[in-house]
Amino acid sequence: MLISRTVMGCGVLGSFLDVALSAVRPEEREGHIERPVAFVEQHRVRLENLLRACGPASRPASHGRYALIGQPETLVILERMEAAPFLLRSKWEEKYEEVFLNDLEFAWSPRVRLNR
């Protein structure tokens, strides 16, 4: 859980959200506020399974993996991972190392996997 505390303590999660939101294309901006709600409704069971398997109380989390899982910002990141994976990854790589996004992608298993 060291990584989770470190990430949260540094205020980086808000920056992760900024990067995810920067992956919203101009034509998607109108009405985007509803997208995470629809995403949760569509993927509720899958999100619950992800949280149970890799969330803050899970065994992998106790070893410092999957630091983003269980954070509210993750819903927007996952929605962008499904809707605009290439754009999300390019925006992410401009600001951060890939490890957090790669871990999240591995745990979520999106339609398009970009983890190298």
Image (cartoon, rainbow, N blue to C red):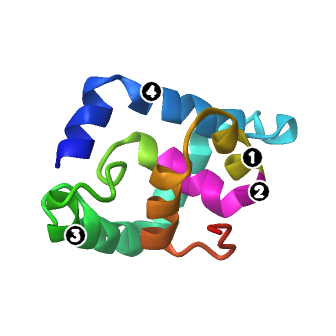
Q: Amino acid at mark 1?
A: Ser
Alpha carbon separation for disc pair 4 and 1: 18 Å
Q: Which mark is residue 86?
A: 2
Alpha carbon separation for disc pair 2 and 3: 27 Å
Q: Reading the chain from its start, which is encountered first: label 4 or label 1? A: 4
Reading the image, the residue beneath label 4 is 14
Secondary structure of the residue carrying numbered label 1: helix
Q: Reading the chain from its start, which is encountered first: label 1 or label 3? A: 3
Secondary structure of the residue carrying numbered label 3: helix
Alpha carbon separation for disc pair 1 and 3: 29 Å
Reading the image, the residue beneath label 1 is 90
Crowding around mark 2 (Cα neighbors within 10 Å: few <14, some 14 to 19, many 20+) is: some
2 vs 3, front mark: 2
Q: Amino acid at mark 3?
A: Arg
Helix, strand or loop for the magenta stretch, by majority: helix
Among all residues in the image, which is located at the extreme right? Answer: 27
Q: Amino acid at mark 2?
A: Phe
Determine contact: label 2, label 1, CB under 8 Å.
yes
Q: Where on the picture, by quarter, is residue 63?
A: bottom left
Q: Quadrant of the C terminus?
A: bottom right
Find out whether residue 30 is within the magenta segment.
no
Q: Reading the chain from its start, which is encountered first: label 4 or label 2? A: 4
